[in-house]
Image: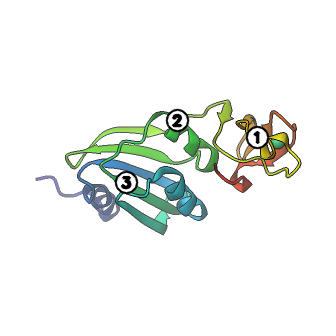
Amino acid sequence: MASDAPTASVSRVRQVEALANGTVIDHIPSEMTLKVAHLLADASDQVFIGMNLRSTRIGRKGVVKISNREIVGKAASSLALIAPSATICIIRDYAVVAKHQIPAPAVFEDVARCANPNCVTNHERCGTRFSVVSPNPLTVRCQYCERTFDAADLSLL
Ligand SMILES: [Zn+2]
């Protein structure tokens, strides 16, 4: 048995251990935690949310755990809009089988609503499309009305 791991890493392991199978999204900026849970969880999912946890990397962080579902593909890309610094761990049988940074797409399609009330995307049934203007803090431009927004301020579709 290995055992001189410092306390901090022991508690981190324990957070992951709580989930038998599913996805752990870690290092979420604390204030975005509920948005992340809302974005990723379906009504029938078992979800665990931790907010204002201490993180050496980002100060205060949030963690969202979703049982029995592996978050990949489009859902993972959507996360890039509101929590680009987060990490995604896929858990199977209590073990982390994959750990990745959030992908960083250059374009976000049908993820968020345009914050410009006059934008055509808020009046016609068409998708939304934002291109990345700058990565940190993430700033995006609506490709329909060409206005630029702070990604954290957009509401999700
Ligand atoms: Zn727009």
Query: Residue at label 2?
Result: 74
Residue 66 has which mark?
A: 3
Residue type, numbered disc 3: Ile
Of marks 1 and 2, the one in the foreground: 2
Residue at image position (76%, 40%) is: 140
Q: At which x and y percent is residue 58?
A: 56, 57
Residue 140 has which mark?
A: 1
Reading the chain from its start, which is encountered first: label 3 or label 2? Answer: 3
Residue farthest along the left direction in this orientation: 1
Mark 1 touching mark 2, by CB under 8 A? no
How far apart, in angstroms, are the residues tagged by discs 3 and 2? 16 Å
Left or right: where 79 falls relative to 150:
left
Q: At which x and y percent is residue 138?
A: 71, 44
Query: Residue 95 is drawn in which quadrant?
Result: top left
Kindly tell me whether residue 120 is visible in this rendering: yes
Residue type, numbered disc 1: Val
Residue farthest along the top direction in this orientation: 106
